[in-house]
Image (cartoon, rainbow, N blue to C red):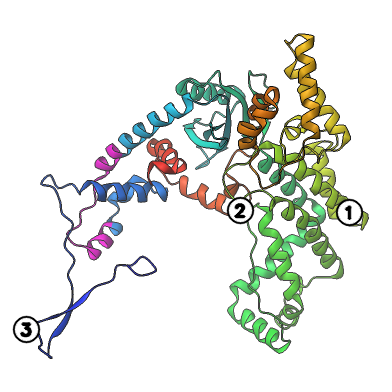
Amino acid sequence: MDHRGRRRFRYQPVGRRGNRGSVIQPLRLKPCRQRRDGNLEIPIKNHWMKMIVSNLQPLEITENANFLEFVKVLNPTLQIPTRSTMCLQLHNLFNKEKNELRGTLDSAEDIVLTCELWSSRAEDSYLTVGGHFVDRLGNLKSYMLNTANLFRDESATNIQNQLSAVMEDWGIKEKVHSVVRAGMPQLEKVKTKWRHMPCFASTLNGVCQDLLSDNKLVNVLRKCQNIVWFFKCDTEAERKLRETQRGLRMKQDELIMYSGDRWPALLPMLQSLIQQYSAMLPVLDERGKTEFILNGNDKKKMKNIILALQPLREVMSMMKGEGFESVSVILPLLRRLMEKLEEEEQRKNDVAQMLLLKCREKFGDVNRHKLAPITFLDPRFKDQLGDQNTKQAMEKIMEELSADMASSAALKVRKELHRYRAYKPNAESSNPLAWWRFTGNTQFRELSKLALKKLGAVSTAVPLERAFSGAGDHFCKLRSCIEPENLNMILFLHSNKSAVS
C-alpha cells in the first residue's frame, strides 16, 4: 500500500533465471474467494456494511446500475451482496449492538437525554434521541438511542410520548433527570418529571440568525454575497481581479461564499471581502456593476458586523472541537462573550449593541443565572461566577442536599460546601467528572453524587462538530437520503461508531 492507501503492484521478472531479456509483468491479484451459495466471504461483507454505515449510504446503492458497473470494471469476479442480504445483516448488527448498549445503560446511575427534531423532506419529520451518562472512570459517555418518524405530528404531546417510549424501551425511565432539546419551543412550558434544557448551540444560532435578519443589516449582507458570487461565476472578472492584485502586490486570498444560516461561515466571507475590495473596485467599475459598489455606510456596517462576531467566534473556540461538553461551560462562556460585546458597545458599535441585547433576552442575567449552581460544582469554573452567582449557587445546593436531613447532618454539608468553595480551582483543561469520581469523592463526599449528576448534563443536543460548522449541514443532507425503514438502524450504528469499527 502507498501513503494514500492505494494497492501497489509488485513486479518480478518472468522467464529463465539470469535472462537479460526477461519481461517484467505485474503480479496478478487473486480473485476474492466466494462460497458456493454465491455470497461474499464474511470479512468483505462486513467491510461493505461498514462503508454503508460510516458514509450514511442507503441500502439501495447495492442495486444501483452505475455503481455495479463501476465495481465490475474494478473486479469482474466481485459480486456485491444483494439488498436483501445486506438488510438482514443490518438487522443482525443493529440488534447485537443494541443489546450490548442496553447492558451498558443498566450500569449508569443518572442519564441525560438529548433530542433533535429534523426533516428529510417537507412532509417528513424525525426525532433523534441520544443518551449521556458518566461512567465509573469519570468519562462522559454519549450514545444515539433512537430515531423515530413523527408522521408530521410535531406537537408537544407527541414528542413527550416519543421520549417516554424511548425511556421505556431502554429501561431508563427512573434514571433520566434532564432532557436537552434543540429548538422545540412547544416543550418550554410542558410539566414533566425531568428538567427541560435548551441546546446552547441551537439557542446561540437562533440569536445570530435573528441579528443577521435585521433590516439594518440584510441589504449590506446581500450586497456582499452578490459581489462574491459575481467574481465566483465570472472567470474573466476573477482573472482581472488577480491581475490587479498582482499589480498592487496584494495577497491573493480565496473568495469565500456564505450561504445558509450558519453564522460562523459569514465572518470569513466578510473578512476576505473587506481585504480584497480595493482590488475589486476597478473591476466592478469597468464592468459597470455599480449596484455592487460599497459606499461608506456599507463598509462601516461590515466592519461592525465583523467586530461583533469575532468575540462570538473566540468564545466558541474555547469549547472542545468534537463530541459533547458539560452544561457547566455555558455560563463562563456567556460571561466572557458579554464582557467583550460590552467593550464593543462602548466603542459605539451598533451591531455589537444589538447582539448584546439579544443575548440578554435569550440567556438572561449572567450575574444571577439559573446555571450558577451547576457551574459552581465544576472545579474549573467555580471561582469565575462573581459574588451574586456564587451566593445563589451555594444556597440552591444547600437547599437541595439538606431537604430531608437532620440539622446536624445539614451543618456538616454546609461546612463541606464552604471547604469546597475555598478549594483551589482545577485547570480548565482537566476533566471535572473524573475529579469528582475520585478526588472529589474522597474530599467532598456529600457533594460528589450531586456534582456528577448535574455535570453529566450536556450543553448541546448535537455533537459539537455539527453544532457550529458546515459539517452539520453535510450530515443532514446524507441522512435525508436513507430509506425511512432503515434510518434508525443506520443512524444508530453510525453514531455509535464502535459498532462498525
Residue 262 location in percent, x, y?
65, 52
- Residue topped by disc 2: 469
Disc 2 and disc 1: Cα gap in Å? 27 Å
Residue 98 location in percent, x, y?
40, 31
Q: Are marks 1 and 3 in contact (CB under 8 Å)?
A: no
Q: Are marks 3 and 2 in contact (CB under 8 Å)?
A: no
- Residue topped by disc 1: 343
Amino acid type at image mark 2: Ser
The count of marks equals 3
Quadrant into which the N terminus falls? bottom left
Tell me the residue at 36%/51% (across/down): 51
Say the numbered circle drawn on residue 16. Answer: 3
Q: Is residue 255 depicted above or below 409 in this figure?
A: below
In the image shown, does 491 or 67 lie closer to the viewer? Answer: 491
Query: Along the horizontal axis of the image, is 367 left or right of 274?
Result: right
Amino acid type at image mark 1: Glu
Q: Earlier in the sequence, mark 3 or mark 2?
A: 3
In the image shown, does 241 or 200 lie closer to the viewer? Answer: 200
Give the magenta part as a residue range: 68-89
Residue density around tag 2, few if under 14, some if 14–19, many if 20 or more, within 10 Å: some
Say the numbered circle drawn on residue 105. Answer: none
Residue 497 location in percent, x, y?
43, 44
In the image shown, does 461 or 485 lie closer to the viewer? Answer: 461
In the image shown, does 343 or 288 lie closer to the viewer? Answer: 343
Badge 1 marks a residue whose secondary structure is: helix
Q: Is residue 46 depicted above or below 327 in this figure?
A: below
Q: Earlier in the sequence, mark 1 or mark 3?
A: 3
Residue density around tag 3, few if under 14, some if 14–19, many if 20 or more, within 10 Å: few
